[in-house]
Image: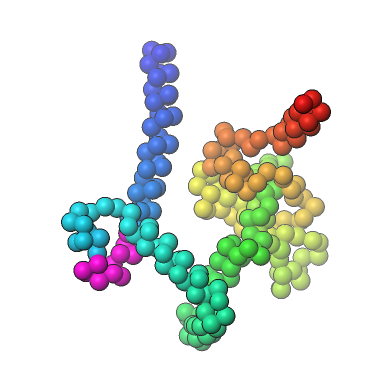
Amino acid sequence: MGALRKWLIAGLLVIVPLVITLGVLNWIIGTLDQTLAILPGAWQPDRLLGVHIPGFGVVLTLLILLLVGAVASNFIGRKFVSWGDALVRRIPVVRSIYSSVKQVSDTVFSDSGNAFRTAVLVQWPREGVWTVAFVTGQPNGEVAAYLRDEYVSVFVPTTPNPTGGYFVLVRRSECIELDMSVDAALKYIVSMGVVAPPDLVAIEESKQTNLSHP
């Protein structure tokens, strides 16, 4: 029985990550393949090839993103984007949704944004209990006016699904900044602590030892 249990666990460790990965990839590809609906019927890959091959929507989406990015990066393109942005912001209801989404996307995806740039240790959900979180900025406006100390905006993700979580304001002095990368911190959270980040101190000491003993 012990050997059967060991084999069963070993099989689960191999199959479960594979099935979940394939399921996520299938959902992403299926979602992106819906972009093919914008093509004329005569240009549909299924009609041209006579067989359905998943994944053409991914290629089309990448081409659209590259094209839009190239246009928006030049002077004339930036003018058109600015005019369109101003137009959307004049539409009631739509402007509130658009402004919020755009502000978040600019913060997350922009090279100059500060979202998810730093992993920190914070005490959550109570004092004495620690978790890994990400600094997303600092409070301003009315919120900052009520906070007398220096605070930072922190996103505390849930595990094993880090897309959900909690937005909290924490004193900067109560945050311990980590040297680990954001990717390593996310792996640590998703794995529920199983996949520990590398010991940067040990790695640095190993490098110094190798340099001193060629």
Vertical comparison of 93 with 174: above or below: below
Residue placed farthest to the front in the image?
A: 214
Residue 127 picture location, percent across and down: 72, 45
Q: Residue at x 67, y 61 (%)?
A: 114
Q: Residue at x 79, y 25 (%)?
A: 213
Asked if the magenta segment contains residue 34, the reply would be: yes
Residue 143 picture location, percent across and down: 71, 69
209 relative to 92 in the view: left or right: right
32 relative to 102 in the view: left or right: left
Q: Quadrant of residue 192?
A: top right
Q: Residue at x 76, y 71 (%)?
A: 145
Q: Quadrant of the C terminus?
A: top right
Main SS type for the magenta part? helix
210 relative to 195 in the view: left or right: right
Q: Quadrant of the N terminus?
A: top left
Vertical comparison of 196 with 122: above or below: above
Residue 80 visible somewhere in the drawing? yes
Question: Depth check: 140 or 185 in front?
Answer: 185
Picture mark count = 0
Magenta part of the chain: 33-43
Residue 87 picture location, percent across and down: 50, 86
Q: Residue at x 74, y 68 (%)?
A: 144
Residue 82 visible somewhere in the drawing? no
Question: Depth check: 182 or 141 in front?
Answer: 182
Q: Quadrant of residue 29?
A: bottom left
Asked if the magenta segment contains residue 172, the reply would be: no
Q: How is the image coloured?
A: rainbow
